[in-house]
Each structure stands twice: as structure tokens, then as C-alpha cells.
Amino acid sequence: MPTDIIVRDLYYAYPPLHEGAEAAPVLKGIQLQVERGEFVALLGRVGAGKTTLCMALNGLVPHVTGGVFRGDVTILGQNTKQHTVPDLARAVGLVFQDPESQIVQMRVEDEVAFGCENLGIAPAEIEERVTWALAAVGLSDYRQRSSLLLSGGEKQRLAIAAMLAMRPQVLVLDEPTASLDPAGKAAVFKVLAELRDRHEITIVMATQELERIARFADRVIVLHQGQIGLDGPPHEVFGQVARLQEWGIGVPQMAELGHLLTRRTGRPHRFIELADAYRELRRQARKLHMEKLGPAAAPRAARRGRSLADEPQIVVRDLAHVYPDGTAALRNINLDIYPGEFIALLGPNGSGKTTLAKHLNGLLKPTHGKVVVEQHDTRTTRIALLARSIGYAFQNPDHQIFAPTVEKEIAFGPRIQDLPASIVAQRVAEALDRFRLIPYADLPPALLGYGQRRQVALAAVLATQPMTLILDEPTGGLDWRSQQEFMEIVADFHALGRTVILITHDMRLVAEYASRAIVLLDGTIAFDGAPAELFGRRDVLDRAGLALPAVTRLAQRLEKHGMTPHVLTLAEFAAAWQARVGACRRKSGKAGRTVAKVRDVDDSQF
Amino acid sequence: MTASFDLYQPGNTAIHRLDPRVKLAFVVEATLLTFLWPHLGVVLAMIGVCVLGLGWARIPAARVGGVLRVIAPLMIMVFILTLLFGAGTGPALVAAGPVVVTAASLARGALLALRLLALALIIFLWLFTTDQASIVRGFVALGVPYEWGLTLALALRYLPLFASLFEQVRDAQQARGLDLEQRSFAGRLQAYQPVLVAMIISALRHSEHLGWALEARAVGATGVRRSTFRPLRFRRADGIVLAGLSLVFVVGVALRVL
């Protein structure tokens, strides 16, 4: 097998943002070799240098970014220092995170042909390559379509096809699925796996998709503090649960479960994938005759719901919304939202989640029916007034960041509510402290890293102290630790008795935080109830393209072997499993005939 | 939805198939003739030709309606201003203090307003029936440097994107309590400042990423003569239309000059 990528002693620092500033190195001595046909996943926290390393592989670092570059990057024998980025494009294709800023043509086939044209390839061969590349990403039927009207997942597959048409041996992707819904993510991963299997294309992909990496990647590389911290097959790397969690990166849920069960029971549980976990726990359940225990009671999640005496805070009646172009986005929506609820708003992209959320703060007005927020009809209330009770954190922090300093950005909301200066100052100080942004208070927020910009955006919304907080896909593209910190802050806000409405695709968040789940399908409410109930509704989940958390599926599969079903979270699973194992042991202690056998098991396992 | 839109209306009519260079010739010629002849008749005829063309190309009425909605306020403004201050000579039809409306200013207002309409229809007949890549190819084939053509293509591609970016930024700032409603013009201008600044930052970030994407797509590869995936083909129909256009143009100019 030829070695397609060789990185030797790579050190890189971006040029300083202003004169006199120290250039902080991002990469500090990277050593890496990638063989032909490997599918390598690149993990690391937000800001760990994943993007920088991806861009070093096609020469954008340092040719375009400048800065201090030491060491060598060699792609198919070509040292990136000696070749320009356009020339390296024949060997390596780079797909970026944002589909919008890499699609430059308005027709699908023109987009795919564009790179070939730039390489001066003859039209007849371009024709062949376009046909091949579109087939490889499953977009053959889209040739003549407008590239602007594709879904996010289709746009990313088009971006991949556009690279493939240049026939690169190496394909590098920088978080290509961060902004996609589950269907879009699944389609992109499937395409990549096929490219490796059928065309022996070498793939390096920076991503936060832990579950999918465990399934698809051949090798996982973890960037930590500018160096390669771990490097190996998924089952080895994800076996290092404690270390990865300490680094803030996290592991697939099954690896985390194995780690938790090992700690709780003392018996080593090592699994990364659901199938392995199922086999191992089933074996143990059989040995203990767990299925002979009576049916287990479902765990009761202690979640703050609403008290019945409360008046609804937001009332939605017969809401319909038709956009000016005639698209009917919402139909027949009826909702009562009570103070203190934690609502997860779910559904595939285009099902109307954001349209509904924008009705709650008046950004959109009903075309039929009405929305009443704390006694104010949104049709006759100014958005600025509604914004005082409804905080809305958008998915993209860059849509709101404008101020010259972080401090002023956070002060903006409280200030335009005409609060006294002393109160504004106090709220800003609290927010800076809570989000650990004090060192950045005087820096321009637009120049911070992505994770920090997200925090500034949320801090700015929370500083207005709204009664209700709407979060649109808050954790997409964030690493494990950043997600946890983010959700802790949201949970604290909720603990004050405030309402949270979370728009998400992440069923783990639903399982861990939500007290109520609402699923939208084609603009209507397909489900409205407790998350535990939703998790049993296969029909709704399938239609909405929602995948249950791995622990929930594992518990469901183990049910016939005696495990408690209806488990939503890791902690619930571990507690339920321990309880069932404990019950088996007590039972076998009383029943004489199995004592010897079980004691045997006990000795070896506990 | 406020999805990014594409001016091009896909189709396979004779007008769609015309060589983009011929369509460009039509745009130039029709514009010149419209402005060369200060006659209502010529302008109306041009509008008629464009309407026929739009019908032939099967452009949905809704899209043409969209153009009219944008152009109508401008037409009304031009008409009223010319009517009131066009100061035509001749007997006054209506006189109220310093404002005098004459038959001449009425005619002139109508002419200027309809010229605007004709110009819009000419340009949109071209944009609706010619896809972005063909427009660029047409320009490049006429000797415009490729970089300019690419810049034009990117502008066409990103205008709708920036329009939707503007909406998203405006929504995000309003959601933070920024009051953009019910204000004086000056107040509104002031209020829009956060929207514009965030917009500019986002646009800069966007163009930086776009620059990377273009390099990664081998724009400017050394020692390469750029090829064309769908080369332009000048067919007989194109020749006939071009000949017709030339004839009309020569006759039109001759009649005007003589």
C-alpha cells in the first residue's frame, strides 16, 4: 500500500491578529502517515487545530493563510511547500463545513464540471467525469437542477462530487456534516464509505460525529494540545474513555456505558458498538437467568414538569403560516406552553420547527390563527417588546455578533431595554464570569474561535434575562465538553423555573433534559408528550428520521433477556442494570438449586 | 420559504436555446432602440415584443409579476415627478399654485415610466432564459477576461445568498430586542447599524472561505488553458435571429438619424 499522506514535524502558527501580539502555535509537531484507502477520522475539541491540519493537507496552510510553518507535508510524493494550492487540487480535494461558501455555480452539472474546466480537461472527458462523480454521490438525477435549491445534505454531496471530478486520490473533509440533519449526515457517511470501498479513495475527515466514526472509520486520530494524542483503530482509541473525557472530546455512548458499568460493577466491560454491547450483556443476563425475574418497573425520571395550577405562558391556537411564495409551512398548530417546561422541538429539516419558533417571538406573524405570549397577541405586539420575555439564540452566532468588544456585545440586549447602567454592568459581569469570557472581554467577538463565538451569542441572550429561552440547534459542531458546558448553563437557567424550548436532532439531549417532546412533520404536530412515551413510538420516530440513543435501543433489545426497558439515559441504564443484576443475585441466594452455579459466576465476575 | 432563488427559469424553448451572445445582442439593441426613440409607440412595441418573448419562453406569470412589483414603485415615482416637475410647454391641464400639469409633461411622464418597464422586461427576458454559466460563457466568448466572467458569475450566485443572509441577521438582531419597527427614517437608519455591521462581518468571513474554495477547485492552476464543459455553438437559428436583429437595428437607427 502506498503512503498517500506524510506529515513530518508539522509546526504552524497563524499570523498574529494585531501587531505586537504573540503568534500562538496551533500545531506543535504533528507526525502522521496515512495509507491508501484508509478512512481516517480526525477528532479534537473546537479550536484544537483540526481545520488547520485539513487546510495544511491541500496547501491552503500556509500558502493562503501565511503565518509560521515548519516541517513538511507530502501528498502523493508532492511537498506542499513546492506546489500551489490549485496544482495540489489534482491530488487532494478539500470539502469545507459550510456548503454555501463552496458551491459557486448555479447548476449541479456546472458545479461538478467547474474544477475540471480549471484543470483544462477536454469537454468529452469532463462529461464522463461529471457522470461518474454524480453517480458516486447518488445525485445522478439532479444534473440539471439548480444547486441553490438542494437540501444541506445534497449540497455537501454535491461539494464532494465537485472534488471527485478532479480525480483526487485523497479527499479531506472539514466537519462536512456539522450543519446537517440526521438524514443528511447518514447520506454523507454512506457516500464516503462507498468511496473508500469501491474507489480506494483515501479519506481524512475532521468531525464530532462520535457514533458514526465508530461505525465507519478505519482509524481515529485525536488532536490534543497541538499534537496527536491518540492514534489507532476506533475500538482502541475509544477504549481510552477516561482520557478522552478528560481532554473534553468524549466517546460513543456505548463506550461510555462500558466505562460506567466497569466502574460501578468492577467487572470490565469493553464495547464500542451496540452489537458488541448487546452480545456481552446478553451473555451475562443469560448466566444470571435475568429473564426469570419479573418485569421491571420503568425508571421514573425526576424531571421538573409543570404544576397544574399554572396558567399557560404561551398559547398557540389554530396557527397556520403560508410564506409569501405560497409554501404552507405550518398547519393547524395548537399548543399551550407552561412556565418551567423544558420542551424539545423535533422534526426533519423543513418540517417547520424554526418557522414555529419564530412565531413565538413575533419574528413571523400567523397567516391564520394566533399566538399569545404572556397575554400579548403577537400580531399586535412589537418584536422588541416580545424579545424581553422570549430570548432566542440562533444557530449561527455570526448573525448577531456585531459589537467591537465582547463586553459591549453582551451589554447590547440589557442596554436597549433601557435598564439602569448599574444593572447592565452587573448582568454583563455575571455573564462574563459564568461563560468564562473575562479574559476576552475587551476583544472583538468576531475574531474569537467558533466555540467562543457561540458562547458570546448565548451569553448575550441570557443577559437580557428572558422568561423563555429558545435554542436553535445549540450543540451542532461543538465538542463533547463544550456541549456539556453549554447544556449545564441551559439547565441552570431552567432550574430557575424558566421555560426552555430546544430545537434539536440530538435524541441524547432530549433524553437527558426534556420534560416534553413535540415532533413536527410537514408543518403539523405529529407528537406532543413525554420523551419516554415518544421513545416507544416507532412510527413517529421513523417518519421524523430520529434515531433513539444507543442505550435506549440496547435496553429495548435486552428486554426479553430481563433488562428494564424504557431507559433513556446512560445513568438510568447503569442504575437499572445494577438493580437487575443485584436482584438476580438476591434471588439466586434464596433459590438453592442455582446457588452453586451463580456463585461460580459471582466469583469470576464481581 | 425565503430560499435563495435563481433568476434562471429552466426550459427548453427556442429562446432558451439561443446562443447567449445573440441574446446579449438583443439586450443591447433593444435597450438602444428604446432610448433612441422618444416615442410611446416604440416603447410600447418593445414591451409587446418582450411580453411575447416571455410567453414564448413559458416564463410563469408569477415571476413576471415579481419583476413588476419591484419596478412598479419606481415607475410611479418617475411618472409623478415628471408629471409635476417636468415643466412641459403648452396649455395647463391642471394648475395648483406652482404645480402645473401639461399634456406634454403627462406624455413625457408616461414615456419615461414605460421606458423603465421596457428596460426591466428586456433584461429579465435575458436573465430568465439564460443560465448563469451561459451568460458568463457568452461574455468570455466575446473577449471579456475569464476572471471578470467568474466575478460576474459569483455575483449572480451570491446576491440571493446575501439577501437571505440579511434576513437572518435582521431576525437575529430583532430577537435580541433591536427595535426596527415604527420609527422615523433617521431612527431606523440608526437602528439598522447592528444589522449592517453583522452583515459585513459575515460577508467578509464568507468571501474568505469562498477564496479558499476557489483555490481548492484549481482556479488559477499553473500552465493550464482553461477548458469549457459546454462550449457555445452558434447554430443556424442563431444566425437567422442575429441577421434579423441587425436588420431591425440598421433600419431603426437609419430612420431615427435621417
Image (cartoon, helix red, strand yellow):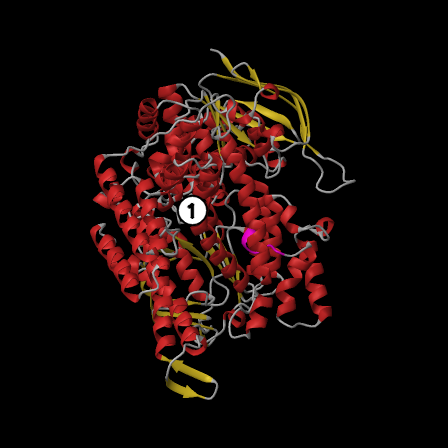
Question: Seen from this angle, which residue lies furthest right?
Answer: A20
The residue that disc 1 covers is: B156
State whether the magenta stretch is mostly helix, strand or loop.
Answer: loop
Q: Position of residue A124 (x, y in %)?
A: 31, 23
Q: Position of residue A274 (x, y in %)?
A: 41, 32
- Residue beneath the point at 46% across and 30% down: A214
- Residue beneath the point at 54% across and 29% down: A42
**Is B55 left or right of A28, judged from the image as shown?**
left
To which quarter of the image does residue B212 belong?
top right
To which quarter of the image does residue A118 belong?
top left
Q: Position of residue B67 (x, y in %)?
A: 34, 60
**Is A592 left or right of A238, judged from the image as shown?**
left
- Residue beneath the point at 50% across and 51% down: A395
Are there few (<14), some (14-19), or many (20+) residues within 10 Å of tag 1?
some
Q: Position of residue A11 (x, y in %)?
A: 68, 25
Per the rendered image, the range of residues in magenta is A398-402
